[in-house]
Image: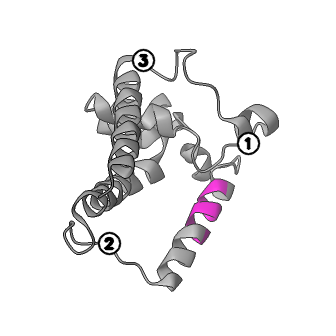
Amino acid sequence: METRNRRLLAALFGAGAVGVILLRVFDPATSRIFPPCPVWYLTGWYCPGCGSLRAIHQLLHGNLQAAWAMNPLTVILLPFICYGLVSHAVIAIRGQGNGLPRLFLPAVWIRALCALIVLYGIVRNLPFYPFDLLAPGAMLRF
């Protein structure tokens, strides 16, 4: 791997580590370090990612129930996203074929996942039960 690419990868992982530390230390629900979701701020609607920072903050504190209440889709997809990032980093460092087993999804599965994310963004804004429970933090009220 070229020195330039190694430096870029190191910088990206350093920035990611700083982001994780900030999420661990500061609660996005109460801290002004993290801006509000632009979709929610401009429209009042929850996007599929609304509550993700709060969910990751709760996961970093070991609180799975609160994380699930903030954004269940993030809790489900985060392990796969982390694995994919680590897998790509290992391949970038060691070269093709020397990484972790790759997660391969056929194009139809990727399209289905995109459709699921869009559908999730729609149903979490429906104002009636049980869909209103998908709003960030709604399940914590019980």
Instruction: Measuring from the top left, give residue 27's x and y in whole percent.
Output: 44, 20
Q: Identify the residue position indicated by label 1 in the image.
A: 45
Q: Which SS does the magenta portion mostly show?
A: helix
Sequence-earlier tag: 1 or 2: 1
Magenta part of the protein: which range? 115-121
* Dots 1, 3 in contact, CB < 8 A: no
The residue pinned by badge 2 equals 103
Q: Is residue 127 above or below residue 41?
A: below
Q: Mark 3 = which residue?
A: 26
- How many discs appear? 3
Q: Is 9 on the left-hand or right-hand side of 90?
A: right
Kind of residue at disc 2? Leu
| Residue 122 tag number | none
Q: Given this view, does label 2 or label 3 mark the residue nearer the observer?
A: 2
State the image coordinates of residue 61 (x, y, percent, origin top left).
28, 27
Instruction: Please state which amino acid type lies under the numbered disc 3.
Output: Phe
58 lies above or below 5: above
